[in-house]
Structures are given as structure tokens and as C-alpha cells.
Image (spheres, helix red, strand yellow):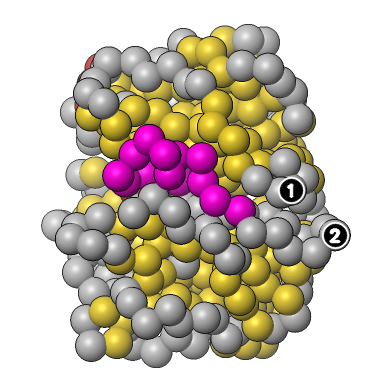
Amino acid sequence: MRSTRWVIWMVLPMLVGGLAAAASATGSLAHQAEFDSISCTSTRSCVAVGFYLGSGGEHTLAEHFNGRSWSMQTTPSPGSAPMLTGVSCGSQRFCMAVGNGSRGTVAELWDGSRWSPSASQSPSGSTSALQAVSCPVAGWCMAVGASHNSQAPLAELYSGGAWTTTPIAPPAGTSFIGLDGISCASETSCLAVGSVTIDRRYAAIAERYANGEWTDVPLQEHGPQPTLSAVSCVGSGYCLAVGDATPQGTPRGPIAVAFSGTSATVLSPGGGSRAGLYGVSCTQAARCVTTGAASRGNVDHTYSEALDGTRWQTLQTTDPGVPDALTGGVWCHSAGSCVAAGYYAGQGAQTAPLSEVLSGTRWRPVPGTAKQL
């Protein structure tokens, strides 16, 4: 299953005062490093998290962007092979990063000066993983993932300085569920998306959090074995979730589902028969920018579409001439001012970060982003 939480996320927001070249601080210490998620409180204050391969193997990674350059931050690396797959900042002095490692779920808290461990729950031990987190305000977060041993969804609430699990009942007839994306418009309203298996086939799923409880949102089936990878909600009660129509192998077309109130409407973005959308950012209801990849000759290339009301528009991305994709998510200040993240293929099996900036309807690369290889 293709999931945006397991591929590179690299976003370099530089929208105010012009564009400055930025390079990841991991370039001097790692042959390979990946950002899996980013959160910003402004264009001059962002945190990106992921992992890097260094001495002793895999380590957690966090970096801060000040509008000009990235600087590496010291993070705890519990157990073996830990990685951070999601981050959300409720303020400049409060960010929560989540992920997984050999001991199960991982959570780390930024207090404005340093990262420290935060004791998340691991109901199935090392088989539990947190994939995404959303913190609409400082001190309150909801994180989602999966408990693979029990083949059940996982949701954890951070409030009052502690984590507690919030039960989600798997839909009837499902044998496995994974939640890959979450967006909370407030402390009382969240939407999580992912996929389930029914009779050995994948299907998209959405779970709504309201009044302290999770409830399943019925979805119309769309395409062969669809899955949802990312979601963005705005305060009006509108959410847009995106993904692709094939969770295994080459995608067979992007999918998008708009949520408003208790209804869910399947939309029809373009993208052709071999494309998928893995990032989304909405600035208003039905005004969103999506990013992902389209395959040509079994090679991925960057892809992006914008939604304006009911109309989809394919946005022009930059093709560096090597396999690349904007699978690392997107963050928008407005409908025509965004940054997106992904990767391009380097030497051997290694990859390096790629970021592009949207001005109007055209994406262009950020100079100096990829320095790992």
C-alpha cells in the first residue's frame, strides 16, 4: 500500500520576502535522509521530521526552518530504527512529532528549546505505529496509526500533558485497518483517513472524531481498491481527502473525497490512468491544492492539481529529468502560494529531497534543496 507517511516529505516554505535557497542540515552527516512530515506556524517558522542513516543505523530527525535555512535539532532516538512520520505545531513553542520504532509508537515534544520524549501508548507493543498527528492548539493533539498485531486502528489523544488511547471500532467485516492521515480543525473536530481490507481487497476509510467519540463515515467505493493517504480540514467543517485507486503497485488514477457535515462526495480529479495524490492543503472550503506523482513508462514524475469549487486544474510542475515525485505533502498560505515536497532518485537506491514552490498556477524548484548525495 502506498502511503504518504512512508515516503519522503520535504517542504521548504519561503513565501515571504522572496525565495532563498535552502539545504537540509543533514547533508554533512548522512548519505541518505528523509523528511516524512512538516508543520509551520508561519513561513518563517517550520519544523520537518523524518529519519537519517548515520552511525549505528537509522535515527530520528528534526530540523527547523527560519525562512532562510534549515538547522538540525537534537532528538531522542529510542530503541533501534526509530523514525518520525508526522509532526504538528500548535505554536512556535509547542510541536508534537510521532512515529515508530522497535519499541512501538514514538512521540516527541518540542517546547521551544528542545525535543524530549513523550510517553505515547503502544497497545500492541512493537507492532503499534503512529503515522500522523494534528495539533490545532498548543497542548492538544490527536495522533493516528495502526496496531498491526490486533489488526485494528489506533488513535491517541494528547491532553493535559499525557497520552490516552481513544477507541475506534473497526468497520464490520474488515480484517485490517491503517490510518495514514488526520486533520483536526479544532479540539472537537477531526477527520482521519486510511484504508481497510475486506475479503483481501483494499478499501478507503474515513473516521470522524466529535464529542469525544470516533464514528465511521460511510464512503462510496471509487475505483479498484482505493485508499486515502492525506486529508486537510478547514474551520468551516469542510475536509478534502486524497489518495489513489490502487494501494499496491502502479496507481491507476487519483481519487478525492470531499466531506461536508455528514456527507461524503467522491470527486473526479484528472491525472490520467496512472497517477496518485498524496498531499493536500485547503485554505478555504473547496479551494485546495493537491500533490503527488504520475507514472510515465513505469517512472514517477511530479504531479499537482488544484480544486476551485467544482473545477480541477492541472498545475505545471518542474521535471528535473530523473524519477521524482511530490509525495511528501503540500502546505499552502493561499490557493496560489504553496510549497510541496517529495523526492528525486539519486545514485543507486538512494533518494534525495525535492521541493517546489507554487506561484499562481506554476510550480518551480527551490534551488539548493537536495544536498544529501
Q: Secondary structure at mark 1?
A: loop
Image position of 47 with respect to 194: above or below:
above
Q: Secondary structure at mark 2?
A: loop
Badge 1 amino acid: Gly
Badge 2 amino acid: Gly
Report the quarter where the C terminus lies: bottom left
First reached walking from the N terminus: tag 2 or tag 1: 2
Instruction: Tell me: 291 left or right of 153.
Output: right
Residue 2 is tagged as none
Instruction: Pinpoint residue 74: horizontal percent, then vertical percent.
Output: 51, 21
Range covered by the magenta-colored residues: 22-35
2 and 1 marks in contact (CB < 8 Å): yes
| Residue in view at x 34 percent, y 28 percent | 59
Label 1 belongs to which residue?
67
Label 2 belongs to which residue?
17
Image position of 100 with respect to 37: above or below:
above
Image position of 126 with respect to 193: above or below:
above
Q: Nearer the viewer, residue 203 or 29?
A: 29
Q: Is residue 53 visible?
A: yes
